[in-house]
Image (cartoon, grey):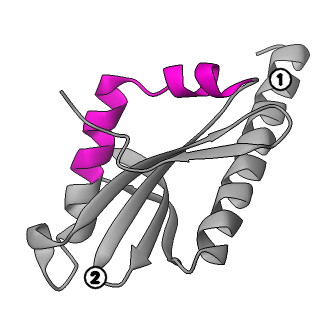
């Protein structure tokens, strides 16, 4: 990997981390409790997992120059992977697979504005 590509990769990584922190702060301000960040299991990584009472909220954070571009970056295959990982996560919850779950997508644009799409991930 060349120096330019490495720099671009590092910038994208840091930008993604910044977007995650922005989204994390929004959910916490709204009273949700962080259960895990960048949780890995079931063959996928879930950016943020929150608890709202007995409900687990799985959040995929996408950053791009605008909301439309960010939304386009969530593929059906990725939605399937996230849902499989969520199934592994809730297996350790008191209600197991009967745990109430919600799958949100948090979009972040180039200037740091956010748009939260609740119940946005649906695997076809």
Q: Quadrant of the N terminus?
A: top right
The correct choice, above or below, for 79 with respect to 4 in the image is below
63 in relation to 119, above or below: above
Which structural element holds mark 2?
Answer: loop
In the rendered structure, are the residues bearing label 1 and label 2 in contact, judged by CB atoms less than 8 Å apart? no
Q: Residue 111, percent across and down? A: 86, 36
- Tell me: 40 left or right of 2: left
Residue picked out by circle 2: 54
Q: Secondary structure at mark 1?
A: helix
Q: Residue at x 72, y 59 (%)?
A: 21
Q: How many neighbours does mark 1 have within 10 angstroms: few (below 14), some (14-19), or many (20 or more)? A: few
Which dot, 1 or 2, sits closer to the camera?
Answer: 2
Instruction: Identify the residue position indicated by label 1 in the image.
Output: 8
In the drawing, does residue 69 fall left or right of residue 60? right
Magenta stretch, residue numbers? 66-85
Precedes in sequence: disc 1 or disc 2: 1
Q: Residue at x 21, y 69 (%)?
A: 100
Is 56 in front, or is 36? 56
Q: Is residue 45 above or below residue 91?
A: above
Where's residue 68, x and y in %?
60, 21
Decide which of 104, 81 is in the foreground and name it.
104
At x 60% / y 27%, what residue is drawn? Answer: 70
């Amino acid at each position: 990997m060349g120096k330019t590509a490495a720099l671009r990769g590092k910038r994208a990584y840091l930008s993604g981390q910044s977007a995650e922190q922005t989204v994390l702060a929004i959910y916490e301000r709204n009273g949700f409790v962080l259960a895990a960040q960048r949780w890995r299991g079931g063959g996928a990584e879930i950016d943020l997992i929150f608890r709202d009472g007995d409900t687990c909220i799985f959040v995929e954070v996408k950053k791009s120059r605008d909301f439309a571009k960010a939304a386009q970056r969530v593929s059906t295959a990725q939605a399937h992977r996230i849902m499989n990982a969520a199934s592994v996560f809730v297996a350790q919850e008191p209600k197991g697979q009967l745990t109430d779950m919600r799958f949100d997508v948090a979009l972040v644009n180039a200037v740091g504005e956010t748009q939260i799409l609740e119940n946005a991930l649906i695997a076809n």
